[in-house]
Amino acid sequence: AFVIFKEMSSATNALRSMQGFPFCDKPMRIQYAKTDSDIIAKMKGTFVKREQERKWKWKRWCKAKGTGDTPGPKKGTGTQGAQGTVPLSENPPNHILFLTNLPEETNELMLSMLFNQFPGFKEVRLVPGRHDIAFVEFDTE
């Protein structure tokens, strides 16, 4: 997973305090990203759109596999992709984080301990009857 911080000091704090933190019986391994996220690159003015690179890699992969498919949505899917998801650029910022694919042993206390160290943490809500889904709410986006 990727977490983006506005300030480097906040990222360093989170990295130091959460490194090795046991989550689902495994120590978390945290490191800085190798490149700036799109958001940070836009703030710095160094953003370069990567759509062409993705298309090129996809075409090369398809050619190697001999499928001849091309990237992008299939016919009849409108603006949504092949799996029915809206592209990330169309999703507005939100103060609620949606968690999915959580292990069965995940509980509210675990998630609260994990996320309460981040600024603006408000609460964790588990979905009744679904051990693999939760929501984490923050005061800000």
Image (cartoon, rainbow, N blue to C red):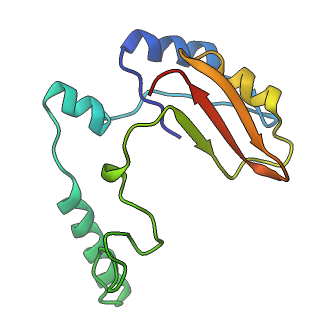
Q: Residue furthest left?
A: 45
- Residue in view at x 76 percent, y 40 percent: 126
- Residue in view at x 35 percent, y 85 percent: 76
- Residue in view at x 50 percent, y 31 percent: 95
Left/right placement of residue 25 relative to residue 78 reads: right
Left/right placement of residue 94 relative to residue 63 reads: right
Left/right placement of residue 97 relative to residue 115 reads: left
In this rendering, does residue 133 appear at all?
Answer: yes
Write down the quadrant of residue 17 in the picture: top right
In this rendering, does residue 21 appear at all?
Answer: no
**122 or 106: nearer the viewer:** 122
Q: How many marks?
A: 0
In the rendered image, residue 3, in percent from the top left (x then y), is placed at 48, 31
Please determine whether, in this image, residue 69 is positioned above or below residue 125: below
Please determine whether, in this image, residue 83 is positioned above or below residue 10: below
Left/right placement of residue 49 relative to residue 103 reads: left
Which image quarter is the C terminus in? top left
Please determine whether, in this image, residue 127 is positioned above or below residue 113: below
In the rendered image, residue 6, in percent from the top left (x then y), is placed at 36, 19
Please determine whether, in this image, residue 93 is positioned above or below residue 11: below
In the rendered image, residue 123, in percent from the top left (x then y), is placed at 68, 25
